[in-house]
Amino acid sequence: MLRRWSAGDEQAREELIDHVYDELKAIARARLGMERSDHTLQPTALVHEAWLKLIRGDQVDWQDRAHFIAVSARVMRQILVDSGRRKRAAKRSDDPAPTLFVPTLHSETERVDILDLDDALERLKGLDPEQARLVELRYFGGLTIPEAAAAMDVSVATANRSWRAARSWLYMALSEAGST
């Protein structure tokens, strides 16, 4: 379906959403699921906005499922960061900065400020772009280590080493920012 969509087949695009919608929503729910019920970033809205950006954006030469999830992860990250920046700019004390629930060094699910995470990921990208990409795939795309390794075309062992290093670096960076 991805290859057909890349070739311009609009029917394939419609079929694709039927196949990936639940997976994208599960990823969004896992990251946003513990937020307040009145939080403005609901998983369904995040998935819909991401899907709209994907279909309105440049034509992508989709390689496989991992590539699609990687691009979707990047789009969801952009949406979340933009939302966080708007909220921070509004400086409304009754609407706290958006957070994500992500695995950290000491926890499988810890609440992290999205803007602090984005800043840390940008700094990590300057030091090691592959580690930053791996974190994006894991945190925003919900990929497992083997899936992320396949998307990055590296071995699982390499992805595991990079993941451990990136998590340690992010833990220190986010601790400095007061997000963990």
Image: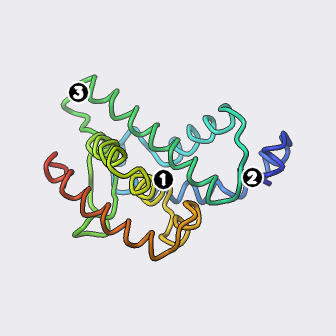
Q: What residue is at 18 percent from the left and 56 percent from the top?
A: 172
Sooner in the amino-acid sequence: mark 3 or mark 1: 1
Specify the amino acid type for callout 2.
Leu
In this picture, is 5 found above or below 65?
above
Using the numbered discs, state the Cα–Cα distance from disc 3 to disc 2 in whole angstroms. Answer: 39 Å
Local crowd at mark 1 within 10 Å, few (<14), some, or many (≥20)? many
Local crowd at mark 2 within 10 Å, few (<14), some, or many (≥20)? some
Residue 16 marker: 2
Specify the amino acid type for callout 1.
Ala
Frontmost residue, 37 versus 107: 107
Viewed as shown, does residue 96 lie left or right of 71?
left
Q: Are marks 3 and 1 in contact (CB under 8 Å)?
A: no
Q: Quadrant of the C terminus?
A: bottom left
In this picture, is 60 found above or below 27?
above
Looking at the rendered structure, the secondary structure element under dot 2 is helix
Q: What residue is at 62 percent from the left and 41 percent from the top?
A: 51
The residue wearing badge 1 is 28
**Where does residue 86 sit, x and y in percent of width and height?**
34, 27
Viewed as shown, does residue 49 lie left or right of 60?
left
Q: Residue furthest top?
A: 90
The residue wearing badge 3 is 92
Specify the amino acid type for callout 3.
Arg
Local crowd at mark 3 within 10 Å, few (<14), some, or many (≥20)? few
Q: What residue is at 26 percent from the left and 38 percent from the top?
A: 97
In this picture, is 140 found above or below 39?
below
Front: mark 3 or 1: 1
Q: Quadrant of residue 63?
A: bottom right
Q: Quadrant of the N terminus?
A: bottom right
Looking at the rendered structure, the secondary structure element under dot 3 is loop
Sooner in the amino-acid sequence: mark 3 or mark 2: 2
